[in-house]
Amino acid sequence: MPHSSIGTGLRPGGPPAVKQPATHASGRIIASYGRRGVLDPGDGTKRRYVLKGRRLKAVCGDLVEWTEQKDSPDALVTAVSERSNALERPDSSGKPELIAANLTRLLVMLAPAPEPDYFMADRYLCSAELMGATGLVIWNKTDIGPDIPEQVATYEGLGYDVLAMSCKLNEGLSQLENILVDGINMLAGQSGVGKSSLINALVADADAAIGELSEASGEGRHTTTASYMHELKAGGQLIDSPGVREFAPVIRDVQKVQAGFREIGRLANQCKFHNCQHLREPDCAVKAALEQGKVSLRRYESYKRLCNSVTMLLKQDH
Ligand SMILES: Nc1nc2c(ncn2[C@@H]2O[C@H](COP(=O)(O)OP(=O)(O)OP(=O)(O)O)[C@@H](O)[C@H]2O)c(=O)[nH]1
Ligand SMILES: [Mg+2]
Ligand SMILES: [Zn+2]
């Protein structure tokens, strides 16, 4: 190869040399909206990306491969690695829609205000069980409601970690930081419970990151409109997500709902019928435990509501 051709952009007799794209590099998706988003290449920078091809789907937490593009500064995502788990919800037509992937923990935040929607909390915890992520409950705003309500204490009784804190008073945050240090954590909960406030407290430059995101997506700044994965000061990642009222786990089989309610799943093998749904069957261990006060009536109501919505979804399919 003649030395003189280097740097001229021309090879004698051949087509113009193009800057050789970097071979495939890996990265982690930290924000996604449609075909575009932001990824972390792992070198302390952030890159905007676009997905290659119609079939690829990427969400927060996904590990991807990407290359440089000739005609754009944006990275081109060419492949998404196999996910260890995925958080999904049904879209408006009932089809599963991916929300986040590769989660270590799913944190459900509740507060004295807005009034807690325990059914929503149960649905998130059900998803955590089914996808194999650790479910955790956060009781925020202890400055306005210091006592953990009985319904929240119920989660503790089931073996979930329950953490009380106040973002406003900066109380209880370091305990949470210590739990989140390893892995990818996702924060879920009703609009207004304080998810973004917690992110602001635990992340060094959350505002900057959110600013970047709204710039790239054209959305406003305050109520969270898209998921964003933040790097925590103390280590670990935390995904902030918009408060969605209609969140539900994607379940296509009523028999599977009980696997998301650990106290119900545990009792199932003591029922008379192996396929007992714990609704109207005789000699049901779950109903017996309910009568003895060993299973919370509210949790059981959540279980029934979820069974009903799965049944409705299945009817829609036909
Ligand atoms: N009193 C009190 N208010 C809080 C606390 N944490 C957050 N807030 C307030 O609650 C309101 C909502 O907080 P956000 O952090 O925006 O709530 P969010 O969960 O991100 O809401 P969405 O983005 O809409 O889902 C704000 O006015 C916060 O200042 C707290 O510990 N105590
Ligand atoms: Mg928010
Ligand atoms: Zn039963």
Image (tube, grey):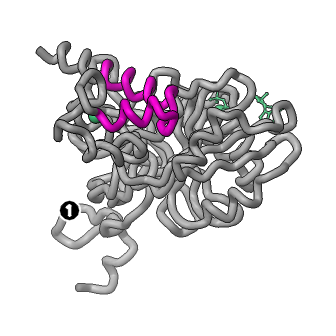
- The answer to whether residue 164 is left or right of residue 263 is right
Observer-nearest of 36 and 30: 30
What stretch of residues is rendered in magenta?
Answer: 284-308
Magenta stretch prevailing secondary structure:
helix
Membership of 287 in magenta stretch: yes
Q: Image height check: is 90 above or below 318?
A: below
Q: Quadrant of the C terminus?
A: top left
- The answer to whether residue 37 is left or right of residue 114 is left
Observer-nearest of 195 and 70: 195
- Asked which secondary structure carries label 1, the reply is loop
Q: Which residue is mark 1?
A: 15
Residue drawn at the location 68% of the way across and 29% of the way down = 221
Residue drawn at the location 39% of the way across and 47% of the way down = 129
- Quarter residue 126 falls in: top left
- The extreme left residue here reads 318
The picture quadrant for ligand 3 comes to top left
Q: Image height check: is 250 above or below 130?
A: above
